[in-house]
Image: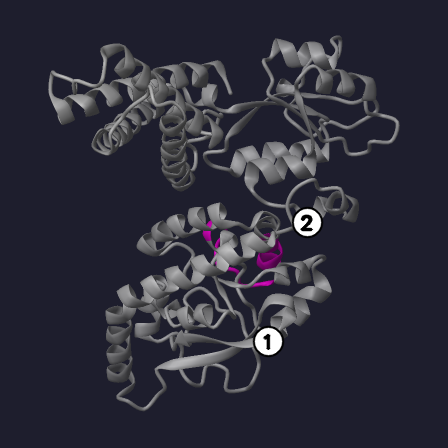
Amino acid sequence: MSRTYVYLGVFEAIVFFLASQLGAFFRFGWVLPPDVSPVSWVATGLFFAVGMSVAMLSMGLYQRGAQEQEAGFVVRLGLAFVLGLVLLAVGFYAVPFLFMGRGVVGLSLVFSFIGISLVRELFARLVDVESRRRRVLVLGAGVNAHSIANALEHGRNLGFLVVGYVQLPRSQVTVDHAKLLPADRSLLELAMAHSVDEIVVAADDQRGKLPVDELVDCKLSGFEVLDLLSFFEKELQIIKIDLLHPSWIFFSTNGFRMSMGGRLTKRLFDVTAALVMLSVAFPLMLLVTIASLIESRGRDPILYHQVRVGQHGRLFQVHKFRSMRVDAEADGVARWAAKNDARITALGSFIRKTRLDELPQIFNVLKGEMSLVGPRPERPEFVQELSAGIPYYAERHRVKPGVTGWAQLLYAYGSDAEDARRKLEYDLYYVKHAGLILDLVILLQTVEVVLFSKGAR
């Protein structure tokens, strides 16, 4: 948390308190019920403000970069309000002196949501973006350090900025020399002078070159110290294959494991959401069916069924609305979809851009072959080829494939092995962090992808 976010937290706590008072005013007017004293009501308002602020804090809404991803922010804000309601219910039960009726609670939450939304909008417009980003000091100035500079150059809305690079002894410099920090001060002094949030170890060769004692000093002084792979995981939400080594997987303290409860919750969510989607999307599916019959004059199939690789390498048939000519692979050779692919029909182009061709996969979800969220299922021919050339490619099959996914959101449509390699970095991130909250974020962001036809071919 930066000082700016501390001030924001205090201001929003005041908003929560005022919302509770406004809720009571709309419920009771100027006169409180006879069994509620002014002191009790003020204490209740303060408890409401503290409880909601704790919920906001617990969901990471006062950390730098909390608002950089709008979909993630909305999900976290909604969960914070749910958690806050639970905390309030427990508090009101444990301390009878505090009292707030259900009507007042409901009104207070509505006013709070409106107030917090307005405050965050003003905050985003008025507060300097750089002051809301994590300040990073990079130990190293060579090839690995340049990969961070390259991410900053090509990335948008990243939640960090680099305050400078520290060159290691007998090491090359590939970053901008203007960003090099003087070597006449210790690492801790540099971190304190530049108000650093985290230090990234990006040395090209760590043998005998790392200032181990200085790094320990920084760690014990409260600065977060990350290796380059963990830094990219945290900031870009990917796991860089070029940096990945087995020991990093062995010693990862979190991730790559979903509890039985988590798996059951995910499955229950998949089934419930799929049934809701099916009921809502059925009219659209009917329209696509009619349009397909008209386009082909009833001669060609409406659906196509294709073998894909699922969880643990099991094969299954994926269902989609047909978007290509029936002779698209008449020679039996599997091909990647390309931009402006001549095999795609006029209707197929439209349903691909709007993702309507994916709707029959709801039945794959209900059958348990797919999840709503997960890595994109690929054809066995491509999987065999990619597994031979890309390390760790088979690990994407640790979870069920999805109708939508992390890679589909954040990377353009893949059309060759290099695209598959880059998408795998996002898929591995999802495999490590798979869970209900991440699924909700992905589904919410998928709405934007569908509306603006991002990544479709």
- The image position of residue 145, as x and y in percent, is 68, 31
Circle 1 packing at 10 Å, graded few (<14), some (14-19), many (20+), is: some
> Where 441 sits versus 369, above or below?
above
Residue 315 is marked as 1
Report, in whole angstroms, how far the alpha carbon at label 2 lies from the one at label 1. 26 Å
| Residue at image coords 48%, 54% | 412
Q: Main secondary structure of the magenta part?
A: helix
The reply to whether the magenta stretch includes residue 360 is no
Q: Secondary structure at mark 2?
A: helix
Q: Quadrant of residue 22?
A: top left
From the viewer's side, name the closer residue of 367 and 428. 367
| Image quadrant containing the C terminus | bottom left
Q: Quadrant of residue 186?
A: top right
From the viewer's side, name the closer residue of 329 and 225. 225
Query: Which residue type carries mark 1?
Result: Leu
The segment highlighted magenta reads 409-424
The reply to whether the magenta stretch includes residue 413 is yes
Residue 52 is marked as none
Q: Secondary structure at mark 1?
A: strand
Residue under circle 2?
241
| Residue at image coords 11%, 20% | 29
Q: Is residue 215 left or right of residue 128?
A: right
Residue farthest to the bottom, as pictured: 299
Is residue 147 shown to the viewer in this render? no
